[in-house]
Image (cartoon, helix red, strand yellow):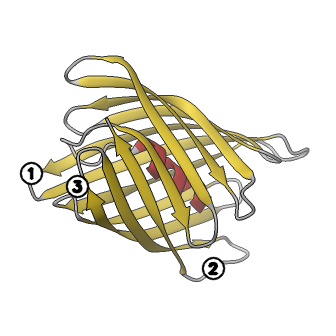
Amino acid sequence: MSKMFTKFVVLVCLLVGAKARPQLGALTFNSDGTSGAAVKVPFGGNKNNIFSAIGGADFNANHKLSSATAGVALDNIRGHGLSLTDTHIPGFGDKLTAAGKLNLFHNNNHDLTANAFATRNMPNIPQVPNFNTVGGGLDYMFKNKVGASLGAAHTDFINRNDYSVGGKLNLFRNPSTSLDFNAGFKKFDTPFMRSGWEPNMGFSLSKFF
């Protein structure tokens, strides 16, 4: 479920900070060989609120499609937002996710945003019922240059908890492009087994309009 949580962060938090501009697209490349792409295209709204169509795809280390996502989002000029997405995972089924973010503080130097989501997992595997995953986190950025994040998610069906901590460093930015380095650790635990803190890192390339 940690990958699903990561996907939520990529797709829902395409606005970084209260005054940032919407992203047209983003590419991610991870140290384990996986990759992803996301797009966000506005189709309506006004000077305070923007409605967008969002989509994304994840690829495994063999460059085969591991998931595909589509949905809609509402972003507010103050950094708040809502989204509703459906993710199809070949060999598993679908995940319907409602998500939101709330900007807690923003000035020229600091930006702090809280996010939360609820997912209805709908597997097409025989004898496996539908089940829920809920989670949330905090994202902090300093001068759009250095950032940190905390996240957690809980899946009731197998009583699984996922945890993540991360950091972000902006390597390059101009009016239309941003290149970031991301690194962090993630772990999970269930009543039957648990992992240690596993490192992960990658690069993300974003285009703005």
Q: Which residue is mark 2?
A: 195
Badge 2 marks a residue whose secondary structure is: loop
The residue beneath circle 3 is: 112
At a point 19% along the width and 21% down the height, the residue shown is 47
User: Disc 3 vs disc 2: Cβ atoms closer than 8 Å?
Assistant: no
Q: Nearer the viewer, mark 2 or mark 1?
A: 1
Mark 1, Cα crowd under 10 Å, few <14 / some 14-19 / many 20+, is few
- Residue 139 vs residue 191: left or right? left
Residue 189 location, quadrant: bottom right
The kind of secondary structure element at disc 3 is: strand
Q: Which is in the foreground here, disc 3 or disc 1?
A: 1
The residue sitting at 39% across, 49% down in the picture is: 206
Tell me the amino acid under the disc marked 1.
Asn
Locate residue 124: give its quadrant.
top right
Q: Which kind of residue does numbered mark 2 sit on?
A: Ser
Q: CA distance from mark 3 to mark 2?
A: 29 Å
Q: Quadrant of the C terminus?
A: top left
Of the two numbered discs 3 and 1 on the same chain, state the one appearing first in sequence: 1
How far is mark 2 from mark 1, CA to CA? 38 Å
Name the residue carrying label 1: 107
